[in-house]
């Protein structure tokens, strides 16, 4: 695939990213990992949950183009809320891959858990970054963005507002090789974003006061 964007360096989606710990109302970070990490391994989570207070700046991780900036529902099946999707260069993304090791590869009796990627990821040369549950969206479809540019503020839209288990303010973040968000619960065309986001140790005292 011909390069469209110039080389860019990774910028974290939030400053000093922490895994969201209180999505269930008590310390349970595993539910925010990528893979079969919910309901004892019987339910997939198609991205990672990063702690983000309401109004906290959200940033473009790489140079790219906004291909979608819209509200995407609040039901269990379409619960992204305010969502931004940015197309980035495959080469830029791959150059930012870190040395992350799966932390919960098989914690359940069924042998399932956190995984590296889902079916279909990498079948195309396209790469997209998805940011969900946003409050204010500061960009629109067609905008060119640069790494480190603020694109939104953290929020609780979509199922982060309506589903009782979503009690911790967080950014839902995905890495995809397709613009389509279909196949969420099958992890279709998705990769574990923890191979790019460089987490710091979670501040539990800070997080516990930012939940319902």
Image: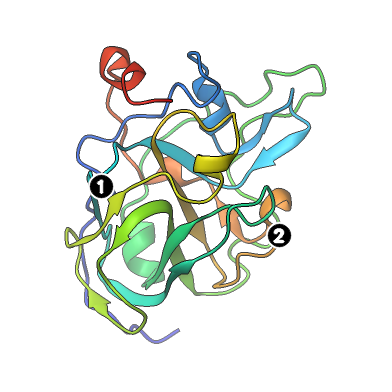
Give the class, few, some or many, for how many residues have Cα within 10 Å of label 1's Cα (few <14, many ≥20).
some
Closer to us: 87 or 168: 168
User: Element at badge 1?
Assistant: loop
- The residue located at (69%, 23%) in the rendering is 106
- Residue 67, image x and y in percent? 42, 78
Against 109, is 37 above or below? Answer: below
Circle 1 residue: 12
Rendered location of residue 5, percent (x, y): 27, 79
Q: How many marks?
A: 2
Residue located at (58% from left, 53% from top): 74
- Badge 2 density bin: few <14, some 14–19, many ≥20, Cα 10 Å: few
Label 2 SS: loop
Q: Name the quadrant of the N terminus.
A: bottom left
In terms of depth relative to the viewer, which is nearer, 198 or 95?
Answer: 198
Of residues 62 and 98, which is closer to you in this image? 62
In the rendered view, tell whether residue 127 sits above or below residue 30.
below
Q: Position of residue 18 (x, y in %)?
A: 32, 30
Q: Which residue is mark 2?
A: 183
Which residue: 26% across, 19% down?
Answer: 206
Q: Measuring 69% from the left and 53% from the top, which residue is drawn there?
A: 77
- In primary-sequence order, the first of circles 1 and 2 is 1
Q: CA distance from mark 1 to mark 2?
A: 26 Å
| Quadrant in the picture for the C terminus | top left
Provide residue 169's location: percent of width, then percent of height.
Answer: 39, 34
């Amino acid at each position: 695939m011909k390069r469209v964007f110039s080389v860019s360096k990774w910028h974290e989606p939030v400053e000093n990213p922490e895994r969201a710990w209180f999505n269930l109302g008590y310390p349970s970070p595993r539910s925010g990992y990528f893979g079969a990490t919910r309901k004892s391994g019987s339910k997939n989570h198609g991205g990672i949950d990063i702690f983000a207070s309401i109004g906290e700046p959200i940033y473009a991780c790489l140079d790219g183009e906004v291909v979608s900036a819209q509200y995407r529902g609040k039901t269990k099946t379409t619960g992204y809320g305010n969502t931004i999707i940015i197309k980035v260069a495959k080469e830029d993304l791959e150059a930012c891959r870190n040395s992350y090791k799966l932390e919960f590869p098989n914690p359940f009796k069924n042998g399932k858990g956190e995984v590296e990627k889902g079916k279909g990821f990498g079948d195309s040369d396209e790469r997209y970054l998805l940011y969900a549950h946003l409050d204010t969206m500061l960009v629109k479809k067609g905008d060119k963005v640069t790494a480190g540019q603020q694109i939104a503020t953290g929020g609780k839209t979509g199922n982060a507002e309506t589903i009782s288990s979503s009690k911790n303010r967080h950014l839902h973040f995905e890495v995809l090789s397709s613009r389509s968000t279909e196949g969420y619960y099958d992890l279709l065309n998705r990769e574990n974003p923890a191979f790019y986001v460089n987490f710091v140790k979670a501040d539990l005292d800070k997080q516990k006061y930012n939940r319902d």
